[in-house]
Image (cartoon, rainbow, N blue to C red):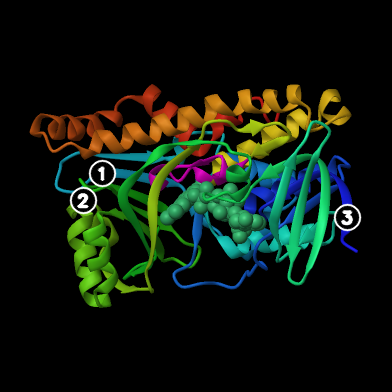
């Protein structure tokens, strides 16, 4: 006989966004299940899959009791951000000391180290985990959502008042719910690697803009940098095929003299990995009794390192509407999910707008625009109000206003 079970909320996708949501809903006494395609692995990969979390995301993880363990396992601190353009004058240095409320703009965290305490907390909680499992059938009905899971040789039906798709960029739940997407393929790849310099970093992140796209250096806990280098498909295949020495000398040329002076010399590079860069935004965040969170709802360019931060803010807003009297009556009802959808749209559009404007500003080769960019970066240093605004956006303080008070 096929087994069946009933939950208040079923979350499909056990990445950082889905698991954070599960933990928070369990704390509100919701009966929650997580369905994850693959058994999670926390071991370190080469190159490390790292993520820059801003101060707002730290506040989120502190609230649910996960920050201390993460900090103990090792995080890179971002206390200074240097923005420059290779082959152009002008350089903006943003220092955390200019925001008295903060000690760090953000933190560079290895994905395995982020997920491990999350899964430990999940296992110690009342959340039911189905993994490895896939969703075979989905009915989005008026009274609830029914899904049939495939777990190896067995099958199981789950019924829930609310189904959340947290299953990443190629979300199966989004497809099954027939939610259309908009966006584009940037025709760029992100080459990711960890780079050792002759001296350890001093908690500085570098964002070097190039015509093909940005090249970011994120300070790791062990003194190296994790780089994310946006390149054309042709450049990507060349960079992946190069030996380490050739890769490092190409990196030296790409980074521009301003940054190179600060980093001294690159001495070693890890294995490299490649990610296609795309913009994919769901046209709706909810349909019937289904809601989307994280990359299932929005996959953005990593230039501003905001994807995970945005996903954690989805969680914050969904938890807030489910914690309301209406949410507690029926977490999947239309009025509750509409409130979530409305809250998210403005934030996602603002981040996409900011990311796209950064990409377009630095993409043009017109000499006059190039001159203006150099002038603008230099001028930023002498515009304290604009600088403070940028700093509050980058650190997540701007979006935090009102959430944690
Ligand atoms: C190169 C690069 C650099 C980045 N750097 C940053 C950064 O510095 N800062 C930042 O904030 N963001 C960054 N991002 C974005 C960030 O990685 C994502 O926004 C974030 O990981 C999304 O989390 P998620 O939990 O929504 O999705 P995912 O991490 O993709 O998790 C989805 C989960 O769902 C599971 N799943 C998938 N399909 C199914 C299915 N059919 N059934 C069940 N389970 C399923 C997967 O196994 C996975 O566990 C970067 C992205 C890239 C590509």
- Left or right: 128 as drawn, with respect to 376: right
Res 333 seen here:
yes
Label 1 neighbour load within 10 Å: few <14, some 14-19, many 20+? many
Q: First in sequence, mark 1 or 2: give its number.
A: 1
Judging depth in this view, the residue of 336 and 287 nearest the camera is: 287
Label 2 neighbour load within 10 Å: few <14, some 14-19, many 20+? some
Q: Do tag 1 and tag 3 residues touch (Cβ < 8 Å)?
A: no
Residue at x 67% of width, y 29% of height: 403
Q: First in sequence, mark 1 or 3: give its number.
A: 3
Mark-to-mark CA distance, 1 and 2: 8 Å
Q: First in sequence, mark 3 or 2: give its number.
A: 3
Mark 2 = which residue?
258
Q: Quadrant of residue 244?
A: bottom left
- Whole-percent x, y for residue 217 in the image: 36, 55
Q: Magenta segment: does it hold 246?
A: no
Mark-to-mark CA distance, 3 and 2: 62 Å
Mark 1 = which residue?
84
Secondary structure under tag 3 reads strand
Secondary structure under tag 1 reads strand
- Left or right: 165 as drawn, with respect to 105: right
Judging depth in this view, the residue of 328 and 380 nearest the camera is: 328
Quadrant in which the C terminus appears: top right
Residue at x 73% of width, y 63% of height: 150
Residue extent of the magenta highlight:
293-307
Residue farthest along the left direction in this orientation: 367
Mark 3 = which residue?
4
């Amino acid at each position: 006989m096929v087994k069946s079970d009933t939950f208040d909320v079923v979350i499909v996708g056990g990445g950082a966004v889905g698991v954070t949501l599960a933990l928070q809903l369990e704390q509100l006494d919701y009966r929650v299940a997580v369905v994850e395609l693959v058994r999670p692995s926390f071991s370190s990969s080469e190159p490390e899959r790292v993520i820059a979390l801003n101060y707002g995301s730290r506040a989120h993880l502190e609230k649910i009791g996960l920050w201390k363990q993460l900090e103990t396992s090792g995080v890179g601190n971002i206390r200074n951000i240097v923005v420059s353009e290779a082959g152009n004058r002008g350089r903006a240095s943003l220092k955390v000391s200019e925001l008295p409320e903060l000690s760090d703009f953000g933190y560079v965290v290895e994905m395995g180290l982020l997920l491990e305490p999350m899964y430990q907390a999940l296992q110690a909680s009342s959340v039911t985990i189905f993994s490895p499992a896939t969703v075979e059938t989905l009915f989005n009905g008026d009274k609830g959502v029914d899904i049939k899971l495939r777990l190896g040789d067995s099958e199981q039906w789950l019924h829930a008042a609310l189904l959340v798709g947290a299953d990443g960029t190629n979300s199966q739940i989004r497809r099954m719910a027939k939610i259309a997407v908009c966006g584009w393929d940037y025709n760029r790849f992100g080459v990711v690697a960890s780079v050792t310099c002759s001296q350890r970093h001093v908690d500085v992140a570098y964002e070097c803009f190039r015509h093909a796209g940005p090249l970011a250096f994120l300070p790791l806990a062990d003194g190296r940098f994790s780089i994310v280098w946006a390149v054309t498909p042709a450049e990507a295949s060349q960079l992946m095929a190069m030996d380490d020495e050739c890769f490092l000398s190409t990196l030296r040329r790409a980074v521009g003299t301003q940054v190179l002076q600060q980093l001294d010399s690159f001495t070693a590079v890890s294995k490299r990995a490649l990610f296609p860069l795309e913009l994919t935004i769901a046209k709706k965040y909810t349909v019937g009794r289904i809601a989307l969170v994280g990359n299932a709802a929005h996959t953005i360019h990593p230039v501003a390192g905001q994807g995970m931060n945005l996903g954690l803010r989805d969680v914050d807003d969904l938890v807030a509407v489910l914690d309301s009297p209406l949410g507690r009556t029926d977490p999947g009802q239309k009025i509750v999910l509409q409130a979530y959808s409305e809250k998210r749209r403005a934030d996602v559009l603002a981040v996409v707008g900011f990311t796209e404007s950064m990409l377009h500003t630095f993409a043009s080769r017109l000499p006059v625009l190039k001159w203006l960019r150099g002038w603008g970066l230099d001028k930023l240093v002498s515009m304290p109000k604009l600088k403070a605004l940028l700093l509050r956006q980058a650190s997540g303080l701007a979006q935090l206003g009102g959430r944690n008070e």
